[in-house]
């Protein structure tokens, strides 16, 4: 038991109100507004996916568009890093159709290149070099489609289908926010 219950009570109250403020306050509204605009302007962004993704980050400094943009890029980096390790793990399993293995090898290479590209995208974004960030994120988006196309061309099912789709949609979201930001900074 805590020796000083009033302090812990205060702390609980503080944390609860912090949480309430972030859940009901401005950040939720700006997420809805941003996702609505992105979905209207970009056919590759779905409103539901956008809201679910941006709301999933508890550390979001999401009270402005710039914060949301950074969150979307960081979500993408997290996604892509995990996809890369997942692909590596799949390649270690012994039994596998050789054409699936070849595709996975290509995807591993693609996603390995994408990890440093995303670090560069984050630097560019923080410096407000939106043109550079756009180029970086477009190449991440391309990597996800190139990976998926490999399986389609070989006529095999893709074990990375969902992950490729997530990477594609998160890239589209980040790109869409960057388009809005670069418009408003001119
Ligand atoms: C949407 O995705 C397609 C297919 O990858 C791409 O060619 C197109 O440029 C994207 N649209 C926008 C607005 O980014
Ligand atoms: C990738 O991001 C999407 C959307 O935020 C999420 O639903 C999914 O679980 C993430 N996948 C990985 C492997 O992190």
Image (spheres, rainbow, N blue to C red):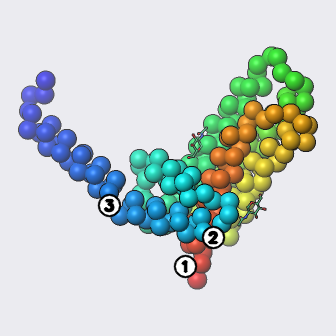
Q: Is mark 1 within 8 Å of ligand 1?
A: no
Place of residue 81 in the rendered image (x, y in percent of width and height, measured from the top left): 64, 40
Place of residue 4 in the rendered image (x, y in percent of width and height, measured from the top left): 8, 33
Residue drawn at (69%, 46%) of the image: 165
Residue drawn at (64%, 63%) of the image: 175
Q: Is mark 2 within 8 Å of ligand 1?
A: yes
Which numbered disc, 1 or 3, marks the residue closer to the eye? 3
Position of 122 with respect to 16 (left or right) is right
For label 1, the crowd category at 10 Å Cα-Cα, with few meaning under 14, some 14 to 19 and many 20 or more, is few
Residue under label 2, please give it: 41
Residue under label 1, please give it: 184
Splitting the image into 4 quarters, where does residue 11 fall?
top left
In the image, farthest residue toward the bottom: 186
Q: CA distance from mark 2 to mark 3?
A: 25 Å
Residue under label 3, please give it: 25
Tell me if I can see residue 178 in this picture: no
- Sequence-wise, the earlier of marks 2 and 1 is 2
């Amino acid at each position: 038991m805590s020796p000083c219950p009033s302090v812990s009570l205060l702390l609980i109250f503080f944390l609860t109100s912090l949480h309430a403020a972030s859940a009901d306050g401005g950040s939720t509204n700006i997420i809805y507004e941003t996702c609505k605009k992105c979905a209207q302007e970009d056919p590759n962004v779905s409103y539901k996916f956008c809201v679910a993704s941006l709301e999933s980050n508890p550390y979001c400094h999401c009270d402005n568009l710039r914060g949301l943009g950074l969150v979307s890029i960081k979500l993408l980096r997290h996604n892509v890093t995990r996809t890369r390790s997942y692909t590596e793990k799949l390649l270690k399993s012994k039994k596998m159709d050789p054409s699936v293995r070849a595709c996975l090898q290509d995807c591993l290479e693609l996603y390995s290149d994408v990890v440093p590209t995303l670090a560069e995208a984050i630097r560019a974004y923080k410096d407000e070099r939106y043109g550079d960030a756009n180029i970086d994120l477009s190449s991440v988006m391309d990597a996800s489609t190139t990976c998926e196309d490999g399986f389609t061309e070989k006529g095999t099912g893709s074990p990375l289908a969902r992950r490729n789709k997530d990477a594609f949609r998160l890239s589209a979201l980040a790109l869409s926010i960057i388009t809005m930001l670069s418009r408003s900074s001119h």
